[in-house]
Amino acid sequence: MKKVLLGAALVAGSLTFAQNTSSSSPVSFGLKAGLNISTISGDDSKAKAGFYGGAFANIPVASSFSVQPEVLYNGVGAKADGMEDLKINLSYISVPVMFQYNALPNFYLEAGPQFSFLIDSKFKYQNVSVDGNDFVKGFDFGIGIGAGYYFTPNIGLTARYVAGVTDIAKETNGIQAEGKNNVFQVGLAYKFK
């Protein structure tokens, strides 16, 4: 619960800062959604497709820099190598806080932390689905890097890679299984003007 409050406080703090910024560009809000291609490192896993979507606020802090906090639904996981029918499906509410550099008027580069809170985990083999919440930690932390290009003032294409920093499995009988979420995201963003 403390971690959920921390994530909410980060977003609220960023939005409060947005109201006080003296930059000439206004704060903008928007929606984004797209495709996740995810794996779990340290494990024999194959990539799995998923979905992400949510909202963001873009807060200019200087002429070429902005901060973009987001709240996203993130569907990640992996397929087990050698067991074609075994899938690990993990659902998170993710709070990335990206620091963006506007290299060109319509093109930006970004990097920043991502805080993720588990809402559901399932291990699926053939037609049998098992609840995995007893095996997966409720909090995940990663570092993201990415880029984006706005074709119009409202519509843009985004790409980001988030490398997991923490192991996702809970410690069991004194043993910590290794495995970190890694996800490549590509999608569309829409800014309200």
Image: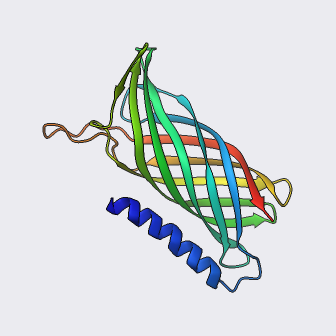
* Picture coordinates of residue 59, whole percent (x, y): 66, 72
Above or below, 96 against 82 in this view is: below
Tell me the residue at 45%/15% (across/down): 85
Eyeballing the image, is 85 above or below 169? above
Taking the image as shown, residue 109 lies to the left or right of residue 36, namely right
Q: How is the image coloured?
A: rainbow
Q: Position of residue 30 (x, y in %)?
A: 70, 59
Q: In the rendered image of this protein, does residue 39 appear above or below residue 24? A: above
Q: Quadrant of residue 173?
A: top left
Q: Residue 192's image quarter?
A: bottom right
Identity of the residue drawn at 50% across and 57% down: 95
Q: Is residue 134 left or right of residue 57?
A: left
Q: Quadrant of the C terminus?
A: bottom right
Residue furthest to the left: 173
Residue visible at 52% across and 35% down?
Answer: 38
From the top left corner, tell me how far across and down residue 183 is, in percent: 53, 41
Q: Position of residue 40 (x, y in %)?
A: 42, 35
Q: Nearer the viewer, residue 131 or 188?
A: 131
- Number of marks in the image? 0
Of all residues, the one furthest to the right in this rendering is 152
Quadrant of the image for the N terminus? Answer: bottom left
Q: Nearer the viewer, residue 164 or 53?
A: 53
Q: Residue at x 40, y 14 (%)?
A: 83
